[in-house]
Image (tube, rainbow, N blue to C red):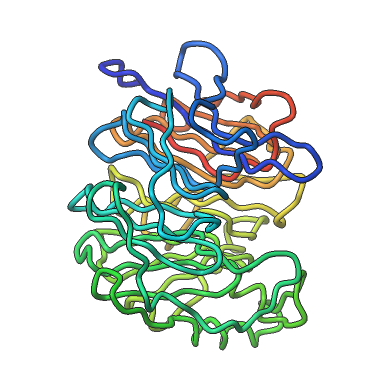
Amino acid sequence: MTNTSARSDVYVGAAGSNSGARGGIFRRTVGNGGWTALTEGLPEASHVQAITVHPTNPDIIYLGTRSGPYRSTNRGERWERLPFPDDGTEVWSIMVHPKNPRVLYAGTSPVGVYRSDDGGDSWRKLPKATQPERVKMKSFVCRVMRLAADPARPDEVYAALEVGGVMRSLDAGESWEDCTSDLLKLAERPELKSKIDSDTEIEGMLDGHALCVSAARPGTVTLAVRMGLFQSSDRGSSWKSMEIGRFSPLTYGRDVVVSPHDPSELFACLSPAARSKDGSLYRSQDLGQSWTRFDHGIKAGSTMMAVALHPRDRAQVYCVSRQGQVFGTQDGGRTWSEDQLPAGVQDAYAVACA
């Protein structure tokens, strides 16, 4: 049953494109009408890559955009740009500290991590959040696509980089370590070699899109990259393939999240490629040992980009495809609905609900 004790909203962020496709952030209240573009306070041409909702106050929402970070205190009715130290820095990920919601981390392009200790009112660039440039991409600069903290040890922070592998901090971001050496070893396997936008076949294994850490097994990190899903049981020091191809014909990993209701439950967005005509949502109930298709009776016409789980109602799950199809269930996956974003909106990157 859907939790009716409080309003539930779904948010989708789109990056738009140089070819004229619209970007921005859009909201739909569950059970009440269509999509609303949330534009007040944002630049006219907004490119939204990340949406993070405050864990205890759903009125507060953070955005990562090509124009920096933004915050709303009224569910997106109005946005304020947060004072970032470096103008022109693109924000691709925002994480709220699992124990102290006043502490935020933001991942950027060019590669960097910033921390705020006052809910976003001020930020500091963490000086050692860098990675070796192993892959020279031709069409974009490397970026921090996802940040995640270990719920059991919240000062341990992990970052997935596109295209740069994984790095970790064990001291709340003050210093960082490269966690990519084992991914490079895996990239020597013929089936894990891939190059699309560079001159090296390690590109696919370092094409990090998302990662998460579960309270069910502290120190275990699950990673989504172009070549599939991978897992580390030793805080990112070594990695093994989860062999997602045993369960899904689609293996391009775009998103992976842990359920806020069950730490052994993972959800992953899987597709054929970055720009494809298919996509799917899979669920694991045993921390990645096995996976089953979770979306039923719907058909994504493009790459499945992101998934969001409702923080108060485990029956609500939403996912979005690159071309703006938004799929949702309010009954734990038994039935699904499809809503298309407004005409012209493409390159959806993020979805959130609260």
Closer to the camera in the image, 97 or 220: 97
Looking at the image, residue 211 lies above or below residue 98: below
Q: Position of residue 77 (x, y in %)?
A: 43, 23
Q: Is residue 55 above or below residue 145?
A: above
Residue 183 percent location from the top left of the image = 53, 81
Residue 132 against residue 195 in the figure, above or below: below
Which residue is located at x 24 percent, y 54 percent?
103
Residue nearest the observer in this picture, 87 or 276: 87
Q: How many marks?
A: 0
Direction top: furthest residue:
32
The residue lying toward the viewer, choosing from 55 and 263, is: 55
Residue that sits furthest to the right in the current view: 19
Residue 194 in which image quadrant:
bottom right
Q: Nearer the viewer, residue 327 or 16?
A: 16
Q: Is residue 309 left or right of residue 196?
A: left
Residue 234 on image: x %, y %: 32, 79
Quadrant of the snapshot with the C terminus = top left
Side of 280 where 346 appears, left or right: right
User: What residue is shown at x 43% (from left), y 82% (from top)?
Assistant: 178
- Where does the image place residue 201, in percent across and percent down from the top left? 72, 81
Q: State which quarter of the image contains the N terminus.
A: top left
Q: Is residue 313 above or below residue 321?
A: above
Residue that appears at 53% across and 84% down: 132
